[in-house]
Image (spheres, helix red, strand yellow):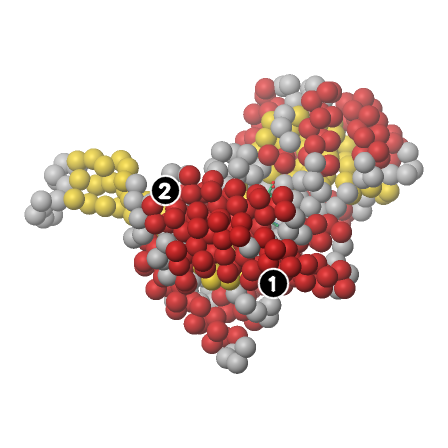
């Protein structure tokens, strides 16, 4: 790259701003054509995608990436199928843009309603998972937003190969190339530039862990919808059904270890601990999950359960490790979650209606669940069609964010020469 990173990002920003105006007025059929053509381009570029991904995986291995990270980075034939299917599904979703609602006549005679519009230019910073490039590009395109995508540095070759397919789709549909731009440098100065260009970028979606949080909180000058870490809990209440408790707590931890909606801490009411914890611990041990517990848990389950430190309650492992704490009451469980959680997703297992009601009212998280696994916190599972991620912010969008979360509404007013008196 001959120009500086700052000049490069400014160029991307300027082009994205121009493209956003074209996209905002693009017809649904044209956006869908771009999505379908990108799907066909991916299908035709399977070998190229696998080759590019091989380079990333080799570099990742050489740099000591662990198995979980390598798994997230890998583009298998099945994952390429999923990306193609994902593009087609987003093409099939209803277009939210231009929808006008709540139109009504007011006493003055004017008509007032609300029209759904794109946000403009969306900058997304995300982990080294190449399929996210397709999810993010497709949702932004369908919702009429231009996007600048900054994926994890370990996925750079895969993301560039995917970007070429998206470009083909845009060209075939006659949409500007700058509608979707994938940052070509792994220099983190590009992140610094992206989050400080309010003249070109309307909103930043950061998906990531602690390092990213600190950087964004310190430097961002553009509005942010945080998609951050998930320290998710399951609380097994004294009134829990044992079978449901075991199924939910097993699935929430072991269905997949890395996602942000996986349970990291299991809280168990003291009155049910001796019945539910031994069979659960047997399942976790069978699956190779390392257990860390409070003193009461260790007394019950044995010394192979490591001692949980204060830091464990505030840790997102993203790995087969689980911290367990026995609590004396629902109040203590709620207090623990609100103190140590990350306001992402938390669940209670209970047959007691009042306890369930208190939990969903008092736990301050984006998703609160009753008798269901935290792994359900996902745009597809919530019926949104797909998701850009899970917002841990309170403003604009909270929880799984789909097409609607990438839009806003403006007032539209119709008169017939009306004037205010
Ligand atoms: N809420 C949600 O929807 C989601 C949340 N997550 C969370 O993400 C985390 C796991 O992902 P992981 O890959 O470890 O995330 P990281 O935070 O390490 O990386 C995510 C992205 O942020 C960039 N980044 C990280 N730190 C900085 C920094 N200081 N300055 C500039 N850029 C930075 C990375 O760039 P680089 O490649 O240069 O490191 C990468 O592009 C977990 O906490 C998980 O819960 C993940 C997915 C979805
Ligand atoms: N929606 C996802 C979880 C969010 C996500 O993408 O997380 P991650 O696997 O950490 O990148 C799922 O449940 O599959």
Left or right placement of residue 386 versus residue 27 in this view: right
Left or right placement of residue 300 versus residue 405 in this view: right
Q: Residue at x 26, y 46 (%)?
A: 411
- Quarter of the image that includes the N terminus: bottom right
Q: Residue at x 86, y 42 (%)?
A: 306
Please tell me in which quadrant of the rendered image residue 108 appears: top left
Q: Position of residue 239 (x, y in %)?
A: 69, 19
Between residue 246 and residue 126, name the one nearer to us. 126
Q: Secondary structure at mark 1?
A: helix
- The correct choice, above or below, for 322 with respect to 149 in the image is above
* Label 1 Cα neighbours within 10 Å, binned few <14 / some 14-19 / many ≥20: many
Q: Residue furthest right?
A: 303
What mark, if any, has residue 304 been given in the picture?
Answer: none
Could you tell which of marks 2 and 1 lies nearer the N-terminus?
2
Give the residue pinned by disc 1: 156
Q: Residue at x 56, y 25 (%)?
A: 357
Q: Secondary structure at mark 2?
A: loop
Q: Is residue 293 visible?
A: no
- The correct choice, above or below, for 185 with respect to 354 in the image is below
Q: Position of residue 349 (x, y in %)?
A: 66, 25
- The correct choice, above or below, for 273 with respect to 132 in the image is above
Q: Quadrant of ligand 2?
A: top right
Between residue 181 and residue 336, name the one nearer to us. 181
Q: Position of residue 234 (x, y in %)?
A: 68, 33
CA separation in Å, label 2 and label 1: 31 Å
Give the residue pinned by disc 2: 95
Q: Is residue 415 visible?
A: yes
Q: Position of residue 90 (x, y in %)?
A: 45, 42
């Amino acid at each position: 790259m001959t120009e500086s990173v700052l000049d490069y990002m400014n160029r991307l920003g300027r082009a994205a701003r121009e493209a956003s105006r074209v996209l905002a007025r693009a017809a649904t059929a044209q956006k869908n054509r771009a999505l379908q053509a990108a799907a066909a381009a991916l299908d035709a570029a399977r070998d190229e995608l696998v080759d590019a991904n091989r380079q990333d995986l080799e570099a990742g291995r050489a740099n000591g990436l662990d198995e979980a990270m390598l798994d997230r980075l890998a583009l298998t034939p099945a994952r390429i199928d999923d990306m193609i299917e994902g593009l087609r599904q987003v093409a099939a979703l209803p277009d939210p843009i231009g929808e006008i609602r709540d139109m009504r006549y007011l006493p003055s005679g004017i008509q007032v309603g609300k029209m759904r519009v794109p946000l403009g230019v969306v900058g997304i910073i995300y982990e080294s998972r190449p399929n996210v490039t397709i999810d993010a590009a497709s949702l932004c395109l369908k919702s009429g937003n231009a996007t600048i995508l900054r994926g994890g540095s370990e996925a750079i070759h895969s993301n560039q190969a995917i970007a070429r397919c998206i470009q083909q789709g845009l060209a075939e549909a006659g949409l500007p190339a700058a509608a979707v731009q994938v940052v070509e440098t792994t220099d983190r100065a590009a992140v610094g530039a992206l989050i400080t260009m309010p003249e070109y970028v309307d909103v930043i979606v950061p998906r990531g862990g602690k390092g990213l949080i600190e950087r964004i909180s310190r430097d961002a000058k553009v509005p942010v919808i945080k998609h951050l870490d998930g320290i998710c809990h399951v609380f097994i209440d004294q009134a829990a059904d044992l079978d449901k408790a075991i199924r939910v707590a097993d699935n929430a931890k072991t269905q997949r270890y890395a996602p942000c909606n996986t349970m990291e801490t299991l809280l168990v009411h003291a009155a049910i601990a001796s019945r539910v914890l031994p069979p659960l611990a047997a399942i976790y041990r069978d699956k190779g999950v390392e257990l860390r517990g409070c003193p009461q848990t260790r007394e019950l389950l044995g010394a192979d359960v490591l001692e949980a430190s204060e830091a464990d309650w505030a840790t997102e492992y993203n790995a087969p490790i689980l911290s367990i704490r026995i609590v004396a009451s629902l109040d203590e469980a709620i207090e623990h979650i609100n103190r140590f959680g990350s306001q992402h997703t938390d669940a209670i297992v209970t047959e007691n209606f009042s306890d369930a009601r208190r939990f969903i009212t008092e736990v301050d998280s984006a998703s609160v669940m009753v008798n269901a696994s935290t792994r359900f916190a996902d745009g597809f599972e919530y019926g949104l069609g797909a998701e850009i991620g899970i917002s841990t912010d309170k403003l604009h969008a909270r929880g799984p964010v789909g097409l609607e979360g990438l839009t806003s509404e403006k007032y539209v007013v119709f008169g017939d020469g009306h004037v205010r008196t």
